Amino acid sequence: MDSLLIFIHANLPLPPLQLLVLCAGVAVAYVIFGLAGFGTALVAGPVLAQFVPVATIVPLLALLDFVAAGVNVARDGKAADTSELKRIVPAMALGSLCGATILLLGRPEVLLLALGVFAVGYAIYSLSGYKSGARFTPRAALPLGLVGGVFSALFGSGGFIYAIYLAGRIEASERIRVTQSTLIGLSTLTRALLFLLAGVYANRQMLLLAASLLPAMLIGATVGRRITLALSRAQFLRIVSAIVLCSGTALIWRYFAR
């Protein structure tokens, strides 16, 4: 038994106390993911940044997000709105290509501020309780899919754009959550494949850390899903709007903190 404990301790990617803190942060982050289908970087990003290199955070979260989205889709995939996926996925893919081009050739920082201001404005409007009675038309999939794809490629922060579109198109909160998870799964799959081809996942310590955080991720996502199933549509949309508000505020802070 002692030799087994020594072996486990020697192969931990971080000291036990640091790993415990990370597991707690990741569990909370994936409660949010289980609720809304996005938003893990809001909680997990700052916690991870205290203990692991910043360059590790994006590929690590891409891996965990992909697994979490895959679990959601495998469990509840039949609830996804395939007609909305068919509308928004091509626009998302095109936006991702545009975002990669901007990242290589341009200065994307100003776009970060614009996205943050838009997110905060939309969230405040949504939380205000004002109802115009208008809903998004199917044509809204093109601009919102493009914008979401661009910012997913640039900053890994486009998930709430898809949530805004889906909340304006789908009635059932469970269908919104599962459809959102499917979109995030497709988006993170693209990023994970790029990281894989670039050799990022050849880092043994990163893979060990991902494996160590996997149970916390699964617990958090399961708790979030159970909470969602007990919510009304109005309660669900208020939670999504609050997360969008936090996302926008974080982006604005990130812009001015550069």
Image (cartoon, rainbow, N blue to C red):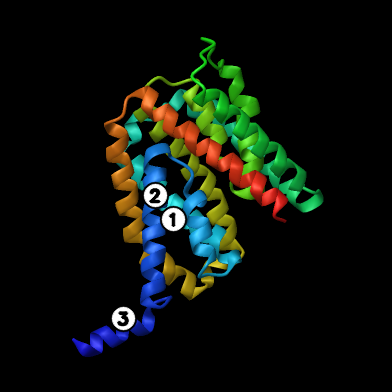
Q: Quadrant of residue 247?
A: top right
**5, above or below 31, in the image:** below
Q: Quadrant of residue 215?
A: bottom left
Residue 129 percent location from the top left of the image: 48, 19
Which residue does the numbered mark 3 point to in the structure image?
8
Residue 25 percent location from the top left of the image: 41, 58
Which residue does the numbered mark 1 point to in the structure image?
64
Q: Are marks 1 and 2 in contact (CB under 8 Å)?
A: yes
Residue 32 percent location from the top left of the image: 41, 44
The amino acid sitting under disc 1 is Leu
| Element on which disc 1 rests | helix
Question: Label 3 neighbourhood size at 10 Å, few (<14), some (14-19), many (20+)?
Answer: few
The amino acid sitting under disc 2 is Tyr
Residue with the most extreme top position: 133
**Of marks 1 and 3, which one's residue comes earlier in the chain?**
3
Q: Nearer the viewer, residue 102 or 232?
A: 232
| Element on which disc 2 rests | helix
Question: Label 2 neighbourhood size at 10 Å, few (<14), some (14-19), many (20+)?
Answer: many
Q: Nearer the viewer, mark 1 or mark 2?
A: 2
The amino acid sitting under disc 3 is Ile
